[in-house]
Amino acid sequence: MSDNNHKAEHSHEEHLREKHLMVDPLPRGKMNEMVMEAMTEPPTWKFWLIFGILAFVVVYFLFYKWGILIMKGQGEAGVMRPDYWGIFLVNTVFWIGISHAGTFISAILRVFKAEFRRPFTRAAELMTTFGLVQAGFSIFMHMGRVWLAYWLMPYPNQRMLWPNLHSPLTWDLLAITTYLLSSTMYLFLPLIPDMAMARDRSTGWRKTFYKTLALGFRGTEGEWTHLRNAMNIFAFAIIPVMFSVHTIVSWDFAAATRPGWSSTIFGPYFIVGALHSGMGAAVIVIAVVRGTMKNMKYFIRPEHFDAIGKLMLIISMAWAYFFFNDYMVQWYGGDKWTQQLLHFHEGGPMGWMWFSMLVCNVVVPWAILWNPKWRSTPWLVGTVGIIINVGMWFERYIIVPISVTINRMPFTWRLYKPGIEVPMGIGTLAFFILLYMAASKLIPLIPVWEVEEGQMAHEFKKFGRETVVSVSELE
Amino acid sequence: MADNISRTENSGLVSLLAVFADLAPAADAIDKLRALGLSDDHMNVISGVPVTEAMLGRPSQWTNVPRLAAGGAVLGFLGGAFLAFVTPYIYPYPIQVSTQAFIPGPPTVVVLFELTMLGMLLSTFLGVFLDSYFPNYRPMEYVKEVSDGKIAVFFMCPEESKDKFTKAMTALGAEKVEVAEVEHL
């Protein structure tokens, strides 16, 4: 081989290393150190400023306003006949949608052995848990008399009445509870080895914290076997649970014979919508973590945005397909009230929202994510993620309060004007970000052992004169 | 069980640990320990990544997690069946929803599915705790280098053969071989 060929091959390998985390390994001790440093470095004044503002927003907009709502009643919110379902339920659907990204990235990509998932599974799993917390808050806000929430629990009350299991709202309780518990356990299991790693490198209160959560994990063959088995069971089993959650949420609407809601494809349409907003949110979080936390540029690289960008593009196409299918069938049906509703969506006072939804969910992702260079640009893909989430929030707003405006009793038609639910919704967003900021200082956001496992499985392989990245199946 | 080495009182035996930087020498070390007369029950491997038994030529580890998951699924299913089939009859009066059957099919499927999955996943999670003896904060044999990517092989050998085993491990590339210390994790 000539010197030139050798140099070219070397530089090609260097290029591959720079591009792919899996073939650019660092010693495990170094990676641990980088993750610990990112987590334990003293927060800057900017961090505390944002944290303080968010904490104020949470206390004032979420909890104080909630107190007002409880004291004065649901009249503080804009819900009134016929719009009994307002922003609280928009936010419930929105946050459950956000929570789908964690399971999608961590479980579906794990089952299909998509290697690019490794560095950001935890960041996505955290979104699931924190998103479900906000969904829970939102549904409790909608409930009004929140102190009676326990009536939903399946046990007999003073009058010996059990919850009516014929009701989609009871299915919601079962599905969301199952999903919240499952996703929290699924977040915790792969975290145990990283907690042990953090325990071995900490002192003071952090040592106590990590020691408690590491549960005495040492990494014996038995412990890994039990953990691996459990994670495999979780990865397969949590997928149908995830599908069931948003399908059941869609049945809250589709099981009613209202114009715009009664649809047989609402289940898959909602799931695709959830993945659309969830992946959008995941990419925002990953871009922020990469941009703001120390050492994260090693773990999260443009290749990851490229991979997520492709998924976002495919999901956007799937969403457009389901949206059009739903629209087409309702339009073709010719029902008088459904026609009225469709015209109201496009040409009513909130028509701008309907068109913005299509621009945000379809036009923007398609215009940007087809280009490999653009979709490998973290800030740009993160911006697309924000736009998609705005679009998906609009979609839920159109499905919930705008759709209930038009019913079969025209004398009740009234445009929904939200009240206290706006600041409270902002409060849930602030609380989500606040929880994430706190978690970034307490939990290793990169699953180091999973990254190392992936790096062990990858190597360069030569096909003729071409050097490529090859992966072995270790399990 | 190999996991319990550190918890067993073995008179005349000493617990040693050999730390290796890589998988291949650790696998060779295990072969060597067998050649020197130790059984697999007297060894344990600790690593910072999941190293499969096949990689180290170790016997398969027994785990109850899948069985517990199946048991939890059955219990969850029974719980769902109780809610779906029994509770409608223990109302003080029957509740008829529209034209639906008294025990309706599709909603029953939803309830059974959710509770079966909840039972399965909860018991899978608890299975890890039970099988791994979590939480366990008692002092145990451990070396912190493991979480830095090293592979530690713990083994018990007769006290008089300690030097022989130490030399054998060092010859195979062990970075250190020493008496295993019990420490608070």
Image (cartoon, coloured by chain):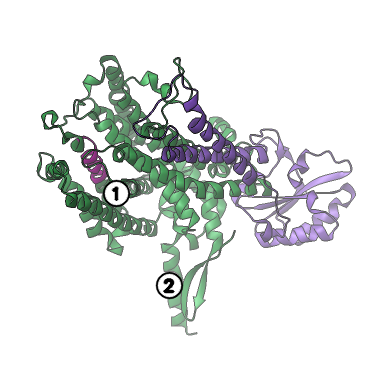
Residue A416 magenta: no
**Measured from the top left, where is residue A384 in percent x and y?**
26, 51
Alpha carbon separation for disc pair 2 and 1: 32 Å
Residue at x 70% of width, y 37% of height: B183
**Measured from the top left, where is residue B165 in percent x and y?**
82, 55
Q: Secondary structure at mark 2?
A: helix
Number of residues whose C-alpha sits closer than 10 Å to that of mark 2, classed few (under 14), some (14–19) or many (20 or more): some
Direction from residue A69 to residue A347 in the image, left or right:
left
**Measured from the top left, where is residue A443 in percent x and y?**
48, 39
What color does chain B have in the rendering?
purple
Residue B173 shows up from this direction = no
A148 or A181: nearer the viewer: A148
Residue at x 41% of width, y 63% of height: A19
Residue at x 47% of width, y 85% of height: A2
Q: Amino acid at mark 2?
A: His
**Tag of residue A12:** 2
Q: Are marks 2 and 1 in contact (CB under 8 Å)?
A: no
Q: Which residues are magenta?
A: A390-401
**Measured from the top left, where is residue A323 in percent x and y?**
25, 51
Direction from residue B177 to residue A73 in the image, left or right:
left
Q: Chain of mark 2?
A: A
Residue marked by disc 1: A385
Q: Secondary structure at mark 1?
A: helix
Q: Amino acid at mark 1?
A: Gly
Q: Chain of mark 1?
A: A
What color does chain A have in the rendering?
green
> In terms of image quadrants, where is residue A417?
top left
A133 or A204: nearer the viewer: A133
